Image (cartoon, rainbow, N blue to C red):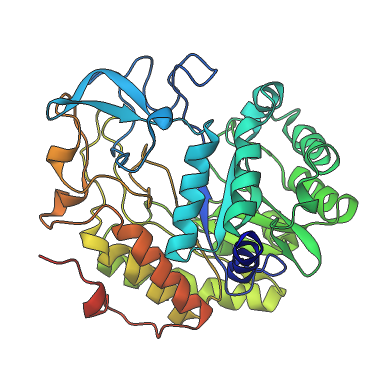
Amino acid sequence: MTSYLAALALFLSVDPSSLDNKVLVGYQGWFTCPGDGTGRWTHWSKGVPTPETLTVEMYPNTTEFDEDELCEIPGMTVGDKPAYLFSSRNPKTVSRHFRWMREYGLDGVLVQRFVGEIRSKRAGGDLVLKNIMAAALESGRTFAIEYDISGGNPETFAQTLLEDWAYLVDELKLTSHPNYQHHKGKPLVSVWGVGLNDGPGHPPATAQEAKDLIAAFKIQHKVTYMGGTPARWGTLSGDSKKTPDWAEVYAMMDVIQPWNIGRYGTIQGVDNWKEQVLIPDLKLTAANGQLYMPVIFPGFSWQNLKRNNRPNQIPRLSGDFLWRQAYNARMAGATMLKIAMFDEVDEATAIMKVVGRRDEAPAQSFWLTLDADGTTIPSDRYLLLSGEITRIFHGDREPTAEIPGELKPVP
């Protein structure tokens, strides 16, 4: 029986050798709670979770979790029972997340690694990353590192990334992992944030610094380099740095992954984005000999994180918003896709299982639940849709502008 299960797992594994037709999801893995070795709540709240300190928007569905995965929230209840959250440091929980990915047919993840947290992650033994490595092997999903340079020290961030990558390769043997994502024989590395025009605190300041970083990764470390770029990278406008030498930076990247979260918020906006941005972007990347990975998201809200913002800022529309983005990307000619994000309940972009009804979330604070748009939505709705979107990019389902009837939520 053991050999049969091993053979079945191998058969069901995603091919890690190519990005072609892949749909990857962002994975934060940044949640902690007292009792997991950290002694604190991280990313759930500013201190102990209360209605005043909460910084997440959506309540995860933990009904499938084992007792040793649950972190009780002091003073919060669902009905007459305690309310719970989870820790990404628990290997059982990360394994569960990856098992969901396998069950619903998702290909794998881009593991978010923030430059400002690298030192603390390594000091703590890179426990979450090791959980991900084990879960990817167990589930047959692929994974790759995506560095986020937000808030990095302009003087040291590049060296920090390069030294950390050498550590991951040499000490953790990351790229030797059988499920590490490669493309054309080279391991994939994504660096998010190069070129963003959001002030002096966001490195690199000059195009030459950016070129040097990309060249070091591509030439010294021989990787396939993915750039998490501004949404308007192709026209050097909007959120992108503006001088012509930045076009040379973007042209050096093997894969372009523009960050368009919040750049539109309606179905009409999604359709406009296809004509105004996606199609021109794909023409430009084709001319540059690059791959293009659009980013789509299910909705957006951060009322708890940013207290002056309204809740449900970009409604999910029962999945229609996510689906139309995927359809438009495919019809524009994209052959791969990123979904942001798997577990980001902070900004309400999570596709993992979150509670569907308001009465399933703690009564003591604000939570944005899946019924916010007036439709009863099952907890696994966005895993299901993401899996079907993946089938479209695999060529196993015909793309349709509207969600097919059999995938519509039951009233």
**Residue shown at the point (12%, 30%) measured from the top left:** 79
* Residue 216 appears in view: yes
- Horizontal side of 135 relative to 118 (left or right) equals left
Between 275 and 131, the residue placed more toward the observer is 131
Between 373 and 150, the residue placed more toward the observer is 373
- Horizontal side of 274 relative to 227 (left or right) equals left
- Horizontal side of 337 relative to 175 (left or right) equals left
Residue 48 at x, y percent in the picture: 35, 15
Tell me: residue 223, above or below residue 160.
Answer: below
* Residue 149 appears in view: no
User: The N terminus is located in which quarter?
Assistant: bottom right
Residue 205 at x, y percent in the picture: 68, 38
**Residue shown at the point (38%, 50%) measured from the top left:** 352
- Horizontal side of 332 relative to 80 (left or right) equals right
Between 15 and 139, the residue placed more toward the observer is 139
Residue 138 at x, y percent in the picture: 60, 53
Tell me: residue 360, above or below residue 384.
Answer: above
User: The C terminus is located in which quarter?
Assistant: bottom left
